[in-house]
Image (tube, helix red, strand yellow):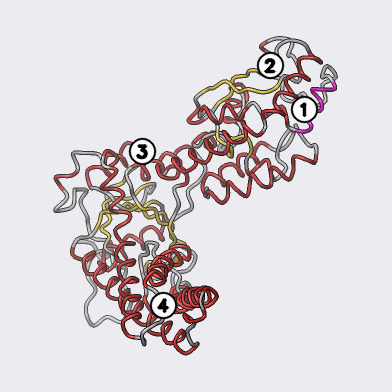
Amino acid sequence: MTTESAPAPHHTRHPVAVPAPATPLRAPRRAAHRHRTAPHTRPGLRAARRLGPAVGLCAADVFALAGTVALIPPLPWPVAALVWAAALQPVLHVCRGLNRPSLSPSALADVPVLAVLALVQWLVLSEALAAYDPQHAVAWRTVLLAVLIQTLLCCGARALVYAVRRRRGARRPQSVLVVGTGAVAHQVTVALLERPRYGMRPVGRIGTTDADTLPQLTTVEDVSRAVVQNDVRHAVFTRQPGADHESSALIALFAAHGCRLWLVDGGAAVGNLWRCVAGRDHLWGFSVQPLRAGLHRPVARAVKRAIDIVLAGAALVVAAPVLAVCALAVRLSDGPGVIFRQERIGLDGHPFTLLKFRTLAPADDHESATLWNIAYDRRMSATGSVLRRTSLDELPQLWNVVRGDMSLVGPRPERPYYVGKFSHAHPGYQARHRMPVGLTGLAQVHGLRGDTSIEERARFDNHYIDTWSPWQDVCIMARTAATLFRLGGS
């Protein structure tokens, strides 16, 4: 035994480093029989795992509402109104993020938000019913009493749910992998090993070369094997994942197995304590937040695909007259061959045929594959120039969206020649292909089209992928529609 690993005498006054105890890489008890089947083959179990914590909190909220109705004086409201109140409450809590998973939940920290949402809930209901029928009007004192009782009951019920969750997590900790290097990763590992309140048991470290008692996982294959064998449920990142292919593959692997992803801020452990008191989640003083897996989530992919089909199909119907006029103009101006077809690279590097209205006939296949920009090509007719400046030449790509080759919003597709060239020159460029390419994207609405920086385009595209949400797609499409009248096609 070395002096570094020897326990300190009880009488010493000097702090000593506590090493992380050895943790073998093996499947947790009670779950050993599950490692034979990959988690991604059991979507029902994965969904139940992710929804489990929220179900308990929803039950606590319903209990609080029922207790409020039972304790306050009888309300002159029909039963249907109380049913609407019960339906409105979880919607408000979900929108505010009160049911999101947390490592250090605090019922007291939730009190201000619970009180405000309860006030909104009861005010909306009382005002709506009073406007509908004055006999259902309720005094302000009754509304404030209902808010107070519901907040107290909700806080107490949530505190009970949190206590039960911590106790159950201490008895049956879930396997976790720690991603990162240096002192922060080691401190996070030690904190998880020594404090069962978090309900996590580290079974390996990823991306570290430091001496450690935990198994070191250096390849994606090692991580995949460890996730399956140990039924890993969480991954804690001690650094922001990059846009490189390895980080993307790692996040995709975790998401495919239904793991929750967490990002730890290693700035200052003690300084973050005030944040956790104010309601921010923390892991033993380190600020922590959920790390989104972007479109690696199956539900997110399904939602995005549904939006694409509905909107692209509707746009094709609405734009049919415009498509007909554009096709006729191209035919009369430039002759036969209205649609121009070109090979582009889409999701996961797979090629597809992109459709556009022909604005310029290339001299040969080589020119079509390698000519960078034809915006100022003198061979272009007046019709082609108008189509390009108004971006109307892109309208046939709505059919690519309906077919599934593209999405409405995503990184713009490029030709194979330039994909290979840019991937070697810019490390983050290849990572753009981890989601479907799109008609427009975050880079395009920031003016990055035509002869602009490829590195900046890749940066915006990867940021979009990492932070994807349906609302972000709506915002990008709205900004794209606003720029169509600026005549800035590339």
353 or 171: nearer the viewer: 353
Residue at 26% from the left image edge and 54% from the top image edge = 175
Give the amino acid at mark 1.
Leu
The label shown at residue 220 is 3
Which badge, 3 or 1, comes first in the chain's sequence? Answer: 3
Badge 2 crowding class, 10 Å Cα cut-off, few under 14, some 14 to 19, many 20 or more, is some
Look at the numbered discs 4 and 1 and tell me whether their residues touch, using CB distance below 8 Å: no
Along the line of sight, which residue is nearer the eye, 213 or 257? 257
Question: Residues in magenta?
Answer: 382-390
Q: Residue at x 50, y 46 (%)?
A: 242
Residue at image mark 2: 368
In this rendering, would 119 be left or right of 150? right
Residue nearer the viewer, 402 or 142: 142
> Does residue 375 appear in this view?
yes
The residue to which callout 1 is attached is 387
- Which x, y percent locates residue 375? 79, 27
Disc 3 vs disc 1: which is toward the camera? 1
Left of 449 or right of it: where is 288? left
Where does the image place residue 164, in percent across and percent down from the top left? 24, 70
Counting residues from the start of the chain, the first of labels 2 and 3 encountered is 3
Residue 438: percent from left, percent from top: 59, 35
How much space separates mark 4 and mark 2, taking CA atoms? 70 Å
Q: Quadrant of the C terminus?
A: top right
Main secondary structure found in the magenta portion: helix
Nearer the observer: mark 2 or 3; the answer is: 2
Secondary structure of the residue carrying tag 2 is helix
Label 4: which secondary element: loop
